[in-house]
Image (spheres, rainbow, N blue to C red):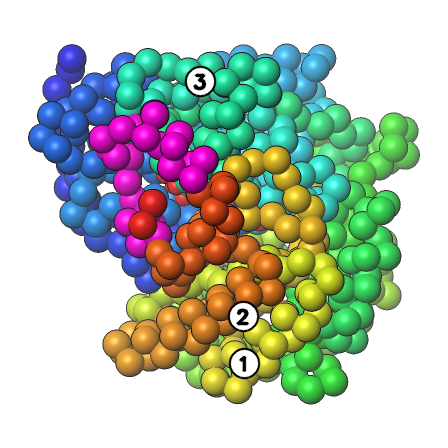
Amino acid sequence: MTGIDWRTEWVGGWGMASGGRADVFRPTTAEQIADAFTAARADGGAVALRGSGCSYGDASTSTGGRVLDLTAMNRILAFDPHAGIARVEPGVTIRDLWRHSIRFGWWPRVVPGTMAVSCGGAAAMNIHGKNNYAVGPFGDCVRSFALLTPAGGVLRCSREQNADVFHAAISGFGMLGCFTELDLELKRVHSGRLSVRAIVARDLQHNLQILEDMRGEADYLVGWLDLHARGALLGRGVMHRADQFAPGEDPEGLRFFDPVLQDVPDRMFGVVPKGWLWPGMWTAVKLGQVRAVNWAKWKAGAREERGSPYRQSHGAFHFLLDYVPRWHWMTKPGGLIQFQPFVPQAVGERVLRTVVEQCQQAGMVPYLGVLKRHRPDAFLMTHAVDGYSLAMDFAVSTTKRGRQRLWQLLQRLADVVLDAGGRFYYAKDSVLLASSFARVHGDVAVAGFRALKQRLDPAGLLQTDLSRRMGV
Ligand SMILES: Cc1cc2nc3c(=O)[nH]c(=O)nc-3n(C[C@H](O)[C@H](O)[C@H](O)COP(=O)(O)OP(=O)(O)OC[C@H]3O[C@@H](n4cnc5c(N)ncnc54)[C@H](O)[C@@H]3O)c2cc1C
């Protein structure tokens, strides 16, 4: 066993509203992960697994504990350009993956709003894209994986082999073992671009109707909502639909198989480094101009609709949030949290309206709202429903009272969502209480998950701030 070089560092959630100092080790091999497990077990400690640290809250932090940061295990081990199958180490990011595959006409089937996330983190959270309603979550593109468990040994898992572990480790938020290798299926694209259309939605009902009308045919759908709009206008926004091109339909788009043309440009108008934009956004937040910014964005939607459809690279469409590096710094010093209820279709409009209205009444209006359509999946700790999610970003106050008020509001709203049969997603959560764990997943799923945890990690070595908060 090699000595483990733990280094004390600050390890925070991406939203900057939580975190603490922890002893961090960056393994480069599966053997080093096993050694770190052994070393931690020897002194009765716990270990948190961490990918790129893009979860908004405490899913990959362990305040005062130990963290295995897997970003140095970032090799693409194999890629089959005929079948579009990649074998990757867990620290390979979505960006690494598409930069490699797009040259051969393949794109990851499921991508989140930032390309910085690692494949290990994407599988552990079973992330969803803007096409969740059509192709399911990230786990549906995983063929198989190797899982190093604290109980010892590497388990090979697929839909045929150790199928129970396959369906639980994907979605299992790093509680059952560490992915050391994953086999992923990508999708064929016939152009480096998508055909994109903006559709202005009058209100929440209109937004939901567009999702229902288009989900049978659109490749991607995502709605931006102006959550400052009230009354009859509540839930107004701009829906974006994107579709792939058929073979030969966009010959000019073949040029965009060059990864350089997919990447998000680092300068605005070719001049201003985008890294300088966040201070302007910070000023807008501090001067209380978020309402005006939302209104301007809503107005711009009509212009965009008139100019639709237009062609946009896959990278530009999917990773809009990466356009402004460090945009989340605009919420400094308090940081931000996200609240993303998933609600069944039948009660979607009523529940989402209630949630937004109560935020408005409390004077804590999210500065960003993103609406998506989902479908159920086969993973044990799934967050998906046959319905909608509305991701809402809240700037966090620096005062204890302001923080408490926000947490109390969102805990009340979580009850509304859970009472209506909704769910939550740990990559985005900061407020749920341990008493909600069984309500999110149901008693049967929780019992099954705990039994697997007992089998694969009997000493409870794998822990995070999130798992302790949820009483896993
Ligand atoms: C700007 C932004 C936009 C986003 N948009 C979306 C979106 O559209 N859709 C969506 O679904 N999510 C979205 N996310 C959330 C993000 O996709 C998830 O939080 C994802 O899990 C982050 O991956 P990561 O590599 O950063 O993992 P981390 O945040 O570091 O860890 C996530 C979880 O994975 C576990 N883990 C990490 N590596 C391993 C491993 N090798 N083996 C086992 N467990 C492991 C950790 O313990 C933790 O529980 C977004 C996040 C940001 C910051």
Q: Quadrant of residue 331?
A: bottom left
Residue kind at label 1, given as amino acid type = Gln
Label 3, secondary structure: give it.
strand
**Ligand 1 image position (quadrant):** top left
The reply to whether dot 3 and dot 2 touch (C-beta < 8 Å) is no
The reply to whether the magenta stretch includes residue 259 is no
Q: Position of residue 256 (x, y in %)?
A: 72, 34
Q: Position of residue 360 (x, y in %)?
A: 54, 83
Q: Quickly name the residue at label 1.
A: 358
Residue at image point 18% right, 22% down: 38
Q: Is mark 1 within 8 Å of ligand 1?
A: no
The reply to whether dot 2 and dot 1 touch (C-beta < 8 Å) is yes
Sequence order check, earlier mark of 3 and 2: 3
Q: Which residues are magenta?
A: 447-470
Residue kind at label 2, given as amino acid type = Val
Q: Quickly name the residue at label 3.
A: 146
Residue at image point 63% right, 70% down: 352
Q: How far apart are the two marked residues, 1 and 3, measured between alpha carbons?
A: 45 Å
Q: Position of residue 307 (x, y in %)?
A: 84, 61
